[in-house]
């Protein structure tokens, strides 16, 4: 049943691409820093899906799964640091609007 | 190389010689650097203790060293104390090394013992001076320099000492620098000595150059039995002596002959060396024509006159000739000049001394005259006699000076108002009963210098007369030398007894009630020196004609071995010696009798003296005016020098200054141009660069919005563009 409805590599890649696009749009358009962070998480997970999918469909390759695990861990630590920065940002500016904190420009 | 032999000076090592000059140096440093506070806190006694302690230690060490020296066999009497190498430049190697041989032994004994006595005397003489610490520092420094001069084993060190004693002489003559005349006298001594020192240096350099001989490469050592002898240019006296004594199997002194054969512009090099060195000697030892500073040097405190300007420093010239006798004996022409100048100076000094009214001036000219005798002795080749006279002169002249100082001290302190000149013989007179010890010491000194057989001066002076008569190497007949010297000896007796009678008899002393004998520190020293002025002569130089063999001659013989071998004396019957001695005594007696007759009782003879003064008005004025040599220097050297200086000053102001100003103006003009270039072109270029960078930055800053969204957008567009490009190019 190698038809359209058999789940194969293109489906995974499509999901991943959609997810990546959503993440990118979120990051590029949202001004709330927390939202931007969420977008970044989407981006990372899109990449992880890609890794796992390739790993599954390429015979004998497990490196992709290991990378996926790395990405999960990386995403977690990134979130911790990023949220800490966001908190500090909030404490200093009383806002989490990325556009309002462009003080380095001056 | 052919094999050479020679009498190489054997020597032993010693470790104590360097300490002899060290202690006076330490004394000078302590008193010189912290003497003022020492004197303020602990009193004069502390200053005296430091100075005297240094002298005492130095004397003690000198005696120990001389005892060590005499314990050696005569030919090996040479102690060497090498400390370290001071200087090595090309062929010149100078060590800090001290050497003691019989000649320097005699000298260091004179310097330390007479020096110590004079230090003791000074504690009394300078008791009231507020700057006593400075005086003793200078005095110690002088002793240090003099010991370096005498003990230094190379001409380099000798020159160091030579300059050092000159400096101390200057400092001590001008000790009371508040008095302009005294400060000037110090300056005069220093400058006159500079002329002499220039000669000394020229002599050394000529000698050094002359030794750099083409025969042997300068650094090669010559193998001889018993060691190696350095040859070539050198300043070390012992090595120089060894080099000169080297001779081949035929007995030819190769190096001495090579040196003696050298000429500069057709003039024998050694003659020039001798003349140049003698110029230095004439400066230091106050011989014609550089004697002018010594009479003025009497401005210094009297102990200084006794120590520096009678007993030690001025005899440095005699010492130098004796030290280098092995060189001087190679040039009979130089010796002739030395003997001639010495004799002329002796007569000249004696004549002036007979007319002076200042007691210290009399003694100063007497010193000049006696030094002339010493140079006559070394000039005719009787080196040990020169040193003998140096020794006896040190004793009796120190005695005379200190006795004169004591008399001056007495007169000075009787005169509270300070209105009279205490050194003027016309203000003295009648002191014999008031200052009996001083009187006796002065009398002993006079008897000694006048040449009566009971005291030291006779033995040395008579030996000089005898050697002058019998000599056969100077190009003047001995009889002429002897006759002039005998005349001078008679004059000596006359002027010394003249000063004696004028000071101690002559008239009743007007201030008799206030004059009293000097303190014990001074009279004790006078007693010791008075005794020395008598006994040193017969003790050290009992004449050969009287069945003796002078001890000093035997003691010094190893030092003068080469020079004595070169000196030639005619053989004369011994009976002639007795005739000559009788003549000396007769002349001395005549001098004494004349002085006694004329000056014993001035009241009786005043009119006659005045009559003579009128009759020989011109002669008297010339002689009393010291033959107007000072004035001649004034018009011939000082005035032209001043005129030239003024001319040069004018040239400086009007020509040199103008050139300098012109140069300054030109520089300023160039600088203005340069400044314009800097401001407009160099700065313009720099500013242009910065302007471009700045404007560029202003435009580029718009890209930096600071908004994350924009950056992400930019990044995304960039990635898409890259992918697209790679796709299309693919």
Image (cartoon, rainbow, N blue to C red):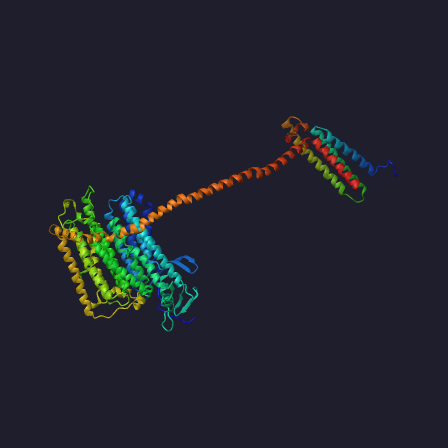
Q: What percent of the width, then of the height, locates residue A41?
A: 73, 33
Q: What percent of the width, then of the height, locates residue B486?
A: 20, 62
- Residue B242, quarter of picture: bottom left
Q: Is residue B502 left or right of residue B289?
A: left
Residue B640 drawn above or below residue B385:
above
Residue positioned 41% across, 45% down in the render: B655
- Front-most of residues A46 and B267: B267
The single residue placed furthest to the bottom in the displayed view is B250
Residue positioned 26% across, 60% down in the render: B342
Whether residue B141 is visible to the viewer of this picture, yes or no, is no
- Residue B400, quarter of picture: bottom left
Quarter of the image where the C terminus of chain B is located? top right
Whether residue B363 is visible to the viewer of this picture, yes or no, is yes
- Front-most of residues B356 and B266: B266
The single residue placed furthest to the left in the displayed view is B604
Residue B50 drawn above or below residue B220:
above
Q: What percent of the width, then of the height, locates residue B612?
A: 15, 53
Residue positioned 81% across, 41% down in the render: A57
- Residue B113, quarter of picture: bottom left
How many marks do you count on the picture? 0
Residue B92 drawn above or below residue B602:
below
Quarter of the image where the N terminus of chain B is located? bottom left
Q: What percent of the width, then of the height, locates residue A95?
A: 66, 26
């Amino acid at each position: 049943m190698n038809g359209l409805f058999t789940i194969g590599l293109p489906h995974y890649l499509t999901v991943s691409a959609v997810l990546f696009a959503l993440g990118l749009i979120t990051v590029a358009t949202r001004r709330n820093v927390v939202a931007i962070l969420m977008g970044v998480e989407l981006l990372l997970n899109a990449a992880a899906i890609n890794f796992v999918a390739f790993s599954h469909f390429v015979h004998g390759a497990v490196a992709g799964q290991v990378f996926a695990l790395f990405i999960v861990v990386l995403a977690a630590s990134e979130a911790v640091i990023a949220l800490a920065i966001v908190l500090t940002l909030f404490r200093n500016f009383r806002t989490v609007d990325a556009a309002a904190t462009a003080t380095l420009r001056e | 190389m052919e094999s050479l032999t020679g009498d190489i000076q054997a020597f032993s090592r010693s470790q104590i010689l360097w300490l002899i000059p060290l202690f006076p140096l330490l004394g000078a440093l302590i008193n010189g650097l912290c003497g003022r506070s020492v004197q303020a806190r602990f009193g004069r006694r502390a200053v005296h203790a430091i100075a005297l302690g240094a002298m005492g230690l130095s004397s003690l060490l000198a005696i120990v060293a001389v005892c060590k020296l005499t314990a050696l066999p005569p030919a090996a009497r040479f102690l060497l104390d090498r400390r370290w190498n001071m200087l090595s430049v090309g062929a010149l190697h100078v060590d800090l090394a001290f050497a003691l041989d019989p000649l320097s032994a005699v000298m260091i004994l004179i310097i330390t013992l007479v020096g110590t006595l004079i230090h003791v005397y000074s504690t009394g003489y300078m008791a009231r001076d507020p700057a006593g610490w400075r005086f003793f520092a200078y005095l110690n420094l002088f002793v240090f320099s003099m010991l370096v001069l005498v003990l230094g084993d190379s001409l380099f060190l000798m020159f160091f000492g030579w300059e050092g004693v000159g400096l101390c002489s200057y400092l001590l003559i001008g000790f009371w620098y508040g008095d302009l005349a005294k400060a000037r006298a110090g300056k005069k001594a220093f400058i006159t000595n500079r002329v002499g020192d220039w000669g000394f240096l020229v002599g050394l350099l000529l000698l050094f150059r002359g030794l750099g001989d083409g025969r042997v490469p300068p650094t090669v050592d010559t193998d001889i039995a018993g060691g190696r002898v350095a040859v070539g240019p050198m300043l070390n006296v012992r090595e120089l002596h060894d080099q000169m004594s080297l001779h081949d199997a035929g007995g030819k002194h190769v190096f001495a002959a090579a040196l003696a054969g050298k000429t500069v512009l057709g003039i024998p090099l050694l003659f020039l060396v001798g003349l140049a060195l003698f110029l230095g000697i004439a400066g230091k030892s106050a011989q014609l024509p550089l004697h002018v500073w010594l009479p003025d040097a009497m401005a210094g405190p009297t102990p200084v006159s006794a120590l520096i300007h009678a007993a030690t420093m001025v005899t440095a010239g005699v010492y130098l000739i004796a030290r280098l006798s092995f060189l001087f004996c190679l040039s009979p022409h130089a010796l002739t000049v030395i003997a001639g100048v010495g004799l002329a100076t002796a007569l000249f000094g004696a004549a002036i001394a007979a007319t002076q009214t200042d007691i210290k001036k009399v003694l100063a000219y007497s010193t000049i005259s006696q030094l002339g005798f010493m140079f006559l002795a070394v000039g005719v080749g009787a080196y040990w006699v020169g040193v003998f006279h140096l020794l006896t002169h040190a004793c009796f002249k120190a005695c005379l000076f200190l006795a004169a100082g004591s008399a001056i001290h007495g007169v000075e302190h009787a005169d509270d108002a300070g209105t009279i000149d205490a050194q003027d013989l016309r203000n003295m007179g009648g002191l014999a009963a008031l200052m009996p010890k001083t009187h006796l010491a002065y009398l002993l000194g006079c008897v000694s210098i006048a040449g009566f057989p009971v005291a030291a001066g006779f033995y040395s002076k008579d030996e000089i007369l005898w050697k002058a008569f019998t000599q056969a190497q100077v190009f003047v007949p001995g009889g002429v030398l002897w006759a002039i010297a005998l005349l001078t000896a008679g004059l000596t007796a006359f002027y010394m007894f003249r000063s004696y009678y004028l000071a101690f008899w002559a008239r009743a002393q007007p201030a008799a009630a206030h004059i009293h004998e000097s303190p014990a520190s001074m009279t004790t020293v006078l007693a010791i020196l008075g005794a020395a002025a008598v006994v040193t002569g017969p003790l050290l130089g009992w004449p050969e004609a009287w069945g003796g063999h002078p001890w000093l001659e035997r003691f010094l013989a190893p030092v003068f071995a080469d020079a004595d071998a070169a000196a030639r004396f005619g053989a004369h019957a011994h009976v002639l010696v007795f005739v000559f001695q009788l003549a000396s005594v007769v002349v001395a007696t005549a001098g004494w009798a004349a002085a006694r007759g004329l000056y014993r009782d001035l009241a009786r003879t005043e009119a006659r003296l005045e009559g003579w003064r009128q009759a020989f008005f011109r002669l008297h004025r010339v002689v009393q005016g010291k033959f107007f040599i000072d004035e001649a220097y004034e018009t011939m050297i000082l005035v032209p020098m001043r005129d030239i200086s003024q001319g040069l000053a004018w040239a400086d102001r009007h020509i040199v200054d103008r050139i300098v100003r012109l140069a300054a103006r030109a520089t300023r003009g160039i600088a203005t141009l340069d400044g314009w270039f800097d401001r407009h072109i160099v700065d313009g270029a720099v500013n242009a660069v910065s302007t471009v960078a700045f404007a560029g930055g202003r435009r580029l800053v718009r890209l930096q919005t600071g908004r994350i969204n924009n950056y992400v957008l930019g990044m995304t567009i960039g990635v898409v563009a890259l992918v697209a490009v790679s796709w299309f190019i693919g």
